[in-house]
Image (cartoon, rainbow, N blue to C red):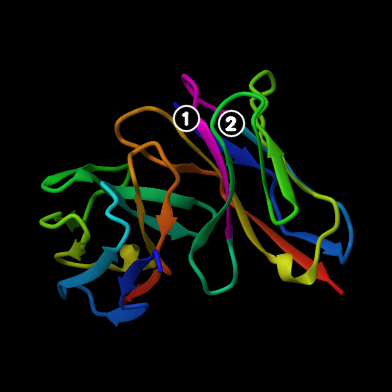
Amino acid sequence: EAQVTQNPRYLITVTGKKLTVTCSQNMNHEYMSWYRQDPGLGLRQIYYSMNVEVTDKGDVPEGYKVSRKEKRNFPLILESPSPNQTSLYFCASSQRFNTEAFFGQGTRLTVV
Amino acid sequence: GNSVTQMEGPVTLSEEAFLTINCTYTATGYPSLFWYVQYPGEGLQLLLKATKADDKGSNKGFEATYRKETTSFHLEKGSVQVSDSAVYFCALRNGGSQGNLIFGKGTKLSVKP
């Protein structure tokens, strides 16, 4: 089954404790991206990757890092999480940058 | 810049009522347009899409037509069901290399039996 898998689904952590949210896709897609969803703001892109070893900032990259060492994986790293990063995070992939995107189930992160 | 504006919710309808969710956009060039649906506790699923002017996307009884002259992509369904209760997002994606999906803020639909 074609899918985008994120882990964990839920995470509560403390300020400053590094964490990684994993994302994996099995569709051999070139393009992957991370979004955060906040009430009243909709979804905003954090980082994206056009292909292996090619990543770039989206609209709200501050406080986040990503890597793309393999085509299927695109982890989101929060080196020092802060409460304003409490949000619902979605990973997405698409064959190319301008084709339809497939989304993961989401990761609800709470930073206290 | 690029932006998407969709009608504020929440929208509450009775089963079998007609649904319209308005969506207008601002974009340079010729974007592709999408409607995504988010059911409670789940991720976003693509509902339908249109890639050029006058294209009509359709799926599961939902339809939307890409209107370049009015920069609109309104979502319609003739007879909603309780199972259609969800949040609906209009989005655009243009040809820029960032590949950023620009989303509207979402419209929550509740359908009552």
Amino acid tagged 1: Asn
Task: Using the rendered view, name the quadrant where residue B11 is placed.
Answer: bottom right
Residue shown at the point (10%, 47%) measured from the top left: A53
Q: Is residue A31 left or right of residue B12?
A: left
Secondary structure of residue under mark 2: strand
Q: Is residue A39 left or right of residue B108?
A: left
Categorize mark 2 by other alpha carbons within 10 Å: few (<14), some (14-19), many (20+): many
Q: Are marks 2 and 1 in contact (CB under 8 Å)?
A: yes
Pointer 2 and pointer 1 on the same chain: yes
Q: Position of residue B77 (x, y in %)?
A: 79, 51
Q: Is residue B30 magenta?
A: yes
Q: Position of residue B39 (x, y in %)?
A: 60, 68
Amino acid tagged 2: Tyr
Q: Position of residue B50 (x, y in %)?
A: 58, 36
Nearer the observer, B71 or A17: B71
Which residue in the protein does label 2 denote? B25
Which image quarter holds the N terminus of chain B?
top left
Residue shown at the point (65%, 42%) measured from the top left: B6
Q: Is residue B32 left or right of residue A44?
A: right
Q: Position of residue B56 (x, y in %)?
A: 68, 35
Secondary structure of residue under mark 1: loop
Q: Is residue B87 magenta?
A: no
> Reading the chain from its start, which is encountered first: label 2 or label 1?
1
Categorize mark 1 by other alpha carbons within 10 Å: few (<14), some (14-19), many (20+): some
Range of magenta residues: B26-37
Residue shown at the point (30%, 31%) measured from the top left: B97
Q: Is residue A65 left or right of residue B55?
A: left
Nearer the observer, A91 or B62: B62
Tag 1, which chain? B
Which residue in the protein does label 1 denote? B2
